[in-house]
Amino acid sequence: MGAGHDGGACVKVDVLVIGAGAAGLMCAMVAGQRGRSVLVVDHANKVGKKILMSGGGRCNFTNMGVTPSCYLSGNPHFAKSALARYTPWDFIAMVEKHRIAYHEKELGQLFCDESSKLIVRMLLDECAQAGVRIEASCGVTRAQRTEEGFNVLTAHGEVHAQSLVVATGGLSIPSMGATGFGYELARQFGHNVLPTRAGLVPLTLSGKHQERYQDLSGVALPVVEARVGKRSFRAGMLFTHRGISGPAILQISSYWQPGDDLRIDLLPEADAGAWLQEQRVARPAAELKNVLADLLPRRLAQRLCELWFESRPMRQYREAELAQIGAQLHDWPIVASGTEGYRTAEVTLGGVDTDGLSSSTLQSKLVPGLFFIGEVVDVTGWLGGYNFQWAWASGHAAGEVV
Ligand code: FDA
């Protein structure tokens, strides 16, 4: 890490990057490799904190199935250009060059075998080789446009830069250094900022809905299908003390807003009605709650029987009743009251409006030399390595021109 630049005189660089996260480090590295003098500042005491904590400490650094349709944005076409020019294979090539062992967990998600520290180390090594200077514990309080670029006041003194890159991320996990500073800068320079909200976040239940399921906290289902409107995700689900979580719920949370109808198919890989008819023939004396416990966690099967269907021996059900129970298992309405918010969210939806940015360079259309990259922009990926790929791709696109 470079030494601080305290000491009075204004430091001059070609490029100042605010935020030493995934996008900022990638942009700095690429710009440095082009021979630009680059300074990266971050107010946190350590760089790349979100990379370090990501993927349970193993960093799900990309996804081999990345397509623009895996991103939410006011402009669904915006991410196409950057994603096409820096692909998962480009990042994988760098990971392999640094001999970092990785594996595919599922659905194209690539994780480090050992530790996400290796990804941060790789980026820092590449930055060091490219002559990039990085200063942690260095917040930015002010940025102003000048005739030749930008004057920026940092905790370590004043910096003059031809290009200013805002890579301050979103609002999620404030304890890790997230701030709304990038949005403030965007507004200051005349950009529109779309309303932000927590994404990839557990959903909460309240009132009687919470009471019904609260004591199921810890119960997990390996595969459900969570649906809001036409959007659905098939993955695991978990009951928590406050509501519901797990990959299927985190994914759908980005598409859910309070008041939306959330439905869960508890048995997406079975025809529940047909299976119950078979069980009626095979086990006529078995009670429904015990039969259901073959396919669902026992405590959930029991609770569903208490709430919805009286549990009787299978022989006592008519065919139509079992068909009805089957249909309910495939279309379970759960009334969420909200989300756990930025405290636990993986990402922030919304942000700097893409209308004001070039999709190929991420440069401001209003202020030449000003760039916004990564999560601060209104582009948000699904769970599974998509958000880092956007950070790498948008950082790379800007790094090529800053
Ligand atoms: P990032 O948040 O990485 O970096 C922003 C930097 O700006 C921070 O270092 C911050 O300190 C700094 N900063 C903010 N305000 C500042 C200011 N005023 N002055 C100076 N510096 C400032 N994604 C994925 O693809 N795979 C995964 O496995 C995970 N896992 C994951 C786990 C958890 C717990 C979270 C919270 C998130 C994930 N993500 C993820 C999402 C991913 O971490 C996120 O999308 C990227 O880190 C975004 O990269 P950025 O560089 O845009 O922001």
Image (tube, rainbow, N blue to C red):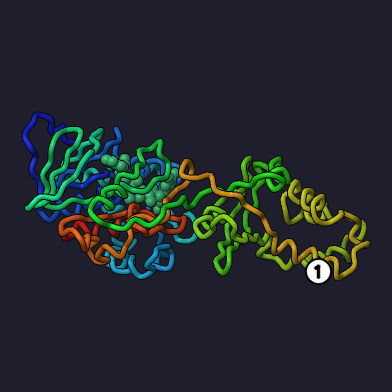
Considering only vertical position in the picture, is 354 above or below 6? below
Q: Residue at x 24, y 58 (%)?
A: 396
Residue 64 seen anywhere in this rendered image of the structure: yes
Q: Residue at x 37, y 48 (%)?
A: 170
**Percent x, y for residue 223?**
62, 57
Task: Describe residue 234's horizontal placement relative to residue 292 as left or right.
Answer: left
Which kind of residue does numbered mark 1 sit on? Answer: Ala
For disc 1, the neighbor class at 10 Å (few under 14, some 14 to 19, many from 20) is: some
Nearer to us in this view, 120 or 266 = 266
**Percent x, y for residue 102?**
39, 51
State which quarter of the image contains the N terminus.
top left
Among the 4 quarters of the image, the one containing residue 176: top left
Report the number of numbered marks: 1
Q: Residue at x 58, y 67 (%)?
A: 229
**Percent x, y for residue 55?**
44, 47
Task: Describe residue 185's horizontal placement relative to residue 60 as left or right.
Answer: left
Among the 4 quarters of the image, the one containing residue 277: bottom right
Task: Describe residue 320's horizontal placement relative to residue 72 as left or right.
Answer: right
Among the 4 quarters of the image, the one containing residue 20: top left
**Percent x, y for residue 82?**
28, 64
Q: Residue at x 53, y 53 (%)?
A: 250
State which quarter of the image contains the C terminus.
bottom left
Residue sitting farthest toward the top: 7
Q: Is mark 1 within 8 Å of ligand 1?
A: no
As helix, strand or loop, the secondary structure at mark 1 comes to helix
Residue 60 seen anywhere in this rendered image of the structure: no
Q: Which residue is mark 1?
A: 323
Nearer to us in this view, 126 or 148 = 148
